[in-house]
């Protein structure tokens, strides 16, 4: 590989990884992926490389800057980092396309580093870790080769001969296997030191600039029938729940998030500024005995802490803010029983919950509840309908009930069952949202299209229930999830990804409280397991979240305590934390690496046929070491050796080696390879003893 | 304001003194300044937010700085640098200064090493810049136990004693963010004399050669006058055989002729009452003329303020003259030269200089360095 190629590829790789550091976060529009073409287009390091006129580069950079400003202006201060990333990408592309000198390349490298910094907020998944490691290696490679290029340029400038620079760029001997080895070693050193700094630098968070992060409030404030469905195909983990028995998981899990209670023509909207209230069984009816489980959740639901059902006790364990060392408090419960934090969440959080599960069917009633004025107030509030509701909808609800013989005084439970069954059986689940283009999407769904996603089913059921006098509301959250681990493993977790986003209905029974109901046909899918590569990736992702993203001052203190203890009894500590299998694999790999190195050295020594020049080199090196100064370049080997006062027996050894060298070199006498190697070893020892 | 600046001068001088004696000196390159700026910004943000990924990225930047320091130290620690005084140096001509770099390590290579030299010129009021920062010679890789000889070149502006003030090895290895230097102090001060500049005096030397002519050399050679007879030796030209004498002696006898040699001259330069710039010019002409006359076979001696050299021939005499002229103090008195029979004393007369008595010829010199200003 020539120096030009080594530098060019390293430079391109660094820029691509810098761009990936923000693009993989998913916050930027997919259109920005086009920016990755820029470094590849101009990759060869050469003055002849493609370089667009300066004004084009300036225009692109200015456009990027304007895009960044526009992003902040339209989305608010919370999107300042996103706006910054947009501007950085624009400036980087402009710079790359109009590059002409080595200094321009350095500017591009700096911009890519800033993108990596932006990625720390915009891209917190494990893919950032992969990009980061690759970036570090590529940056070491690019900087080392850049040093060589810079030196070659300085030399050619000093000599006033541009051809020398070109010749140096064509050199192949500089980028040798040894150079690759040095780069690899340096990369390992950089990554190890980085890890050390990461682990042990005190987490002293003074403030919280997390507010500058783009809001991760990805759950909408309304269940709207206009726009994209909340369920997506994303694999990003939104929550993990530890401590749920497999049987409960197999029966179906609903992780409650925000509650949408105000009905409009084509949406259910969450009302702001609702009063807090004390937990009450009237609020939400459970379907199981009480469980103790732990939730790790990404901050995607505003201030709501998602739970699997009515929560009796919630204890915040860590996180919730951009600074993991600062802990968010639990403020209380909202009127719909949702658990609220004391402010908007801006970082992943971990909390323990004690409470029951809420899911369709099998609700436990509370015999103490009676229909009274208070429950009537709830019914009055949650049966309000929008004025412009299509009149065919109440007629449809009445018609369905009539067909099932439930006219007049049917119970809310019967109404909910019948209406839910009607939707589940007569309608088709589809992620396409063709109804959204209709003037009245709800009516379009019920009377024309008869297909839609979960938000259509939830809105339709809640609306139908309200028309029949049953109080209802729509709930957003996560549903289903994937089981990661063995069914009997107490450490197994249920993993909820973006694809598990869902909306369902809660209706009110005056004698039992709020009951969960789900009319979406796709929601009844059975349990699914994370297996194979997906399970392995999830383990990695969990480790990343637990030990990198969520690492805080407390974890740091724990680590220090463990390290202190381990220093006292290292073997026991090793046994405690590393399994025998892992230990044996590690040791085997070390032995294998040692054998490989030994084989490589043996081959190298075989390839280097020892001859008298090797002996002369050892003689000169030993002479230099003993005398403390380099022999004159004009001195012969004999002059160099005789100019030194050798200590002890080293003089006789040097004399013997010198005579053998001269006999071989000048008299053509044969000296055995073994003798040459022996003298070389002994001279090496003499040199070492002078250190 | 001026008082404040004056009060700052002493601490600055102390700082410079300490800086020059520090075991390592670090200069932050442009890229390094950018990196430090980023590190400060990222550090502030990381500590402020506690964002772990920001800590991770910040750690990488700090690591780059730490690793730069460690590896550049590793490179400099194993180096030995020695500088030799040049054998001959002329003002106005490039002087190569040999620098020997030696890697004392057994296994580690030293990478990207440059040597930084500073030479001080003589404290001469006629010189505008007595300090020379030499362009650093560079070696990309110095293997374990290897030595490289590099040459730093500089063009001295004037003659006189020059000293090596600074000898430093520097490296920007591995990333180019910092340039770390290690000063080396030679056991003995490196100093050398720079001879006066070379000027074109070819016309003048030709005229002097024509005017002074040659004299018998009192040794056999290629002249025309009879010198002696001697027995024939293998290789002698047969045309030199003296037939009559050969017949008498009954063996081959050849004729030897006497060689011709250029005359002995002593060039005299008086600098009394001459301004320094003109005096330097006079010394340059004296040195160049001496060289040319020596090349034409003359035995040349020199008389200048504080300098008296007997006539001599050859490279040794040339070196003596140039070395002597390099050391001339223009304020010194003229030496008293003994009368030598057969020696021509030729005075080089600068404008404004006092006239000299007892010389055989006077050469009037112009005021500038151009040869056209030299007139006999």
Image: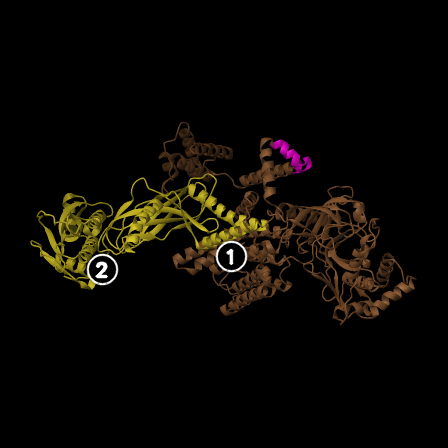
Chain colours: A brown, B yellow
Snapshot quadrant of residue A649? top left
Which residue is at the front of the view, A543 or A373? A373
Q: Which mark, by number, is residue A110?
A: 1
Q: Is residue A584 magenta?
A: yes
Q: Residue B300: x and y, percent?
A: 16, 51
CA distance separating discs 1 and 2: 56 Å
Q: Are marks 1 and 2 in contact (CB under 8 Å)?
A: no
Mark 1 Cα-neighbour bin, 10 Å: few <14, some 14–19, many ≥20: some
Q: Is A524 situated left or right of A153 in this image? A: right
Q: Is the magenta stretch mostly helix, strand or loop?
A: helix
Mark 2 Cα-neighbour bin, 10 Å: few <14, some 14–19, many ≥20: some
Image point (60%, 48%), residue name: A326
Q: Residue B330: x and y, percent?
A: 16, 52
Q: Is A164 situated left or right of B256 in this image? A: right
Quick check: can you spot residue A531?
A: no
Is residue B216 depicted above or below A467 in this figure? above
Which secondary structure lies at badge 1? helix
Q: What stretch is highlighted in magenta?
A: A570-585
Snapshot quadrant of residue A41? bottom right
Quick check: can you spot residue A634?
A: yes
Which residue is at the front of the view, A26 or B308? A26
Q: Which chain carries label 2?
A: B
Residue named by callout 2: B200
Quarter occupied by the C terminus of chain B: bottom left
Labels 1, 2: one chain: no
Which residue is at the front of the view, B88 or A64? A64
Q: Is residue A296 magenta?
A: no
Q: Residue B10: x and y, percent?
A: 30, 48
Q: Which chain carries label 1?
A: A
């Amino acid at each position: 590989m020539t120096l030009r190629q080594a530098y060019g590829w390293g430079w391109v790789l660094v820029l691509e990884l810098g761009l990936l550091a923000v693009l993989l976060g998913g916050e930027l529009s997919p259109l920005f992926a086009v920016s990755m073409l820029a470094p590849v287009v101009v990759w060869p390091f050469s003055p002849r490389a493609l370089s667009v006129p300066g004004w084009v580069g300036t225009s692109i950079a200015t456009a990027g800057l304007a895009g960044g400003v526009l992003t902040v202006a339209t989305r608010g201060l919370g999107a300042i980092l996103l706006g910054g990333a947009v501007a950085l990408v624009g400036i980087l592309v402009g710079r790359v396309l109009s590059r002409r000198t080595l200094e321009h390349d350095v500017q591009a490298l700096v911009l890519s580093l800033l993108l990596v910094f932006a990625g720390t907020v915009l891209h917190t998944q494990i893919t950032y870790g992969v990009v980061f490691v690759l970036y570090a290696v590529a940056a070491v490679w690019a900087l080392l080769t850049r040093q060589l290029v810079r030196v070659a340029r300085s030399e050619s400038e000093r000599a006033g001969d541009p051809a020398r620079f070109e010749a140096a760029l064509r050199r192949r001997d500089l980028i040798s296997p040894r150079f690759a080895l040095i780069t690899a070693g340096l990369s390992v050193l950089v990554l190890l030191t980085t890890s050390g700094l990461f682990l042990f630098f005190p987490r002293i968070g003074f403030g919280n600039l997390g507010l500058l992060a783009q809001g991760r409030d990805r759950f909408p404030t309304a269940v709207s029938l206009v726009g994209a469905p909340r369920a997506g195909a994303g694999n990003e983990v939104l929550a993990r729940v530890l401590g749920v028995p497999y049987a409960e998981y197999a029966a179906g899990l609903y992780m409650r998030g925000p509650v949408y209670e105000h009905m409009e023509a084509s949406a259910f909207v969450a009302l702001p500024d609702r009063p807090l209230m004390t937990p009450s069984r009237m609020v939400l009816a459970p379907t199981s005995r009480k469980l103790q489980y732990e939730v790790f959740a990404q901050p995607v639901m505003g201030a709501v802490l998602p739970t699997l059902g009515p929560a009796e006790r919630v204890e915040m364990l860590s996180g919730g803010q951009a600074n993991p060392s600062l802990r968010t408090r639990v403020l209380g419960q909202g009127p719909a029983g949702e658990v609220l934090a004391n402010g908007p969440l801006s970082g992943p959080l971990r909390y323990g919950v004690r409470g029951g599960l809420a899911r369709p069917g099998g609700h436990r009633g509370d015999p103490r509840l009676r229909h009274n004025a208070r429950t009537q107030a709830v019914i009055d509030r949650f049966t309000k309908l929008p004025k412009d509701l299509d009149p065919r909808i109440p007629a449809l609800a009445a018609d369905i009930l009539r067909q099932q013989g439930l006219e007049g005084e049917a119970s809310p439970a019967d109404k909910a069952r019948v209406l839910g069954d009607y939707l589940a059986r007569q309608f088709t689940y589809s992620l396409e949202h063709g109804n959204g283009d209709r003037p009245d999407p709800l009516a379009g769904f019920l009377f024309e299209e008869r297909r839609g996603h979960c938000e259509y089913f939830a809105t339709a059921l809640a609306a139908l229930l309200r028309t029949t006098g049953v109080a209802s509301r729509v709930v957003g959250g996560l549903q289903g999830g994937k089981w990661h681990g063995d069914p009997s493993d107490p450490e197994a977790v249920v993993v909820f990804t973006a694809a598990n986003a869902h909306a369902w209905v809660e209706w009110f029974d005056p004698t039992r409280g709020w009951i969960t109901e789900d009319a979406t046909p796709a929601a009844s899918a059975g349990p699914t397991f994370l297996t194979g590569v997906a399970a392995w990736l999830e383990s990695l992702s969990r480790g990343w979240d637990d030990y990198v993203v969520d690492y805080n001052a407390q974890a740091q203190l724990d680590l220090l305590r463990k390290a202190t203890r381990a220093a006292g009894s290292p073997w026991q500590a090793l046994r405690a934390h590393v399994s025998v299998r892992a230990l044996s694999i590690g040791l085997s790999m070390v032995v294998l690496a040692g054998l490989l190195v030994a084989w490589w050295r043996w081959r190298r020594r075989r390839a280097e046929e020892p001859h008298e020049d090797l002996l002369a080199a050892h003689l000169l090196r030993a002479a230099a070491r003993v005398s403390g100064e380099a022999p004159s370049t004009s001195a012969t080997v004999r002059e160099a050796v005789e100019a030194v006062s050798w200590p002890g027996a080293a003089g006789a050894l040097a004399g013997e080696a010198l005579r053998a060298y001269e006999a071989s070199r000048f008299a053509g006498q044969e000296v055995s390879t073994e003798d040459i190697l022996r003298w070389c070893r002994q001279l090496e020892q003499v040199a070492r003893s002078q250190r | 304001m001026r008082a404040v600046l004056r009060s700052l001068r002493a601490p600055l001088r102390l700082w410079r003194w300490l800086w020059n004696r520090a075991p390592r000196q670090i200069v932050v390159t442009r890229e390094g300044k950018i990196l430090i700026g980023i590190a400060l910004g990222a550090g502030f943000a990381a500590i402020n937010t506690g964002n772990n990924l920001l800590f991770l990225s910040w750690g990488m930047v700090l690591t780059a700085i730490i690793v730069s320091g460690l590896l550049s130290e590793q490179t400099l620690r194993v180096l030995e640098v020695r500088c030799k005084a040049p054998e001959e140096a002329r003002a106005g001509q490039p002087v190569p200064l040999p620098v020997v770099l030696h890697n004392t390590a057994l296994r580690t290579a030293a990478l990207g090493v440059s040597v930084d030299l500073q030479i001080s010129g003589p404290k001469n009021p006629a010189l505008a810049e007595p300090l020379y920062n030499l362009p650093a010679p560079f070696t990309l890789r110095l293997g374990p136990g290897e030595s490289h000889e590099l040459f730093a070149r500089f063009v001295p502006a004037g003659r006189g004693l020059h000293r090596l003030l600074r000898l430093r090895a520097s490296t920007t290895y591995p990333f180019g963010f910092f340039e770390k230097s290690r000063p080396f102090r030679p056991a003995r001060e490196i100093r050398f004399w720079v001879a006066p500049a070379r000027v074109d005096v070819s016309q003048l030397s030709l005229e002097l050669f024509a005017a002074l002519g040659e004299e018998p050399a009192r040794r056999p050679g290629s002249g025309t006058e009879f010198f002696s007879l001697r027995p024939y030796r293998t290789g002698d030209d047969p045309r030199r055989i003296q037939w009559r004498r050969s017949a008498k002696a009954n063996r081959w006898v050849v004729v030897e002729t006497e060689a011709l040699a250029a005359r002995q001259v002593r060039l005299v330069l008086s600098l009394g009452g001459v301004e320094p710039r003109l005096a330097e010019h006079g010394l340059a002409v004296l040195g160049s003329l001496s060289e040319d006359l020596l090349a034409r076979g003359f035995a040349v001696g020199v008389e200048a303020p504080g300098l008296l050299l007997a006539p001599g021939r050859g490279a040794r005499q040339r070196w003596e003259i140039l070395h002597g002229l390099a050391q001339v103090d223009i304020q010194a008195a003229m030496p008293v030269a003994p009368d030598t029979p057969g020696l021509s004393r030729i005075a080089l007369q600068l404008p404004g200089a006092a006239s000299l008595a007892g010389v055989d010829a006077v050469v009037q010199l112009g005021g500038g360095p151009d040869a056209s200003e030299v007139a006999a």
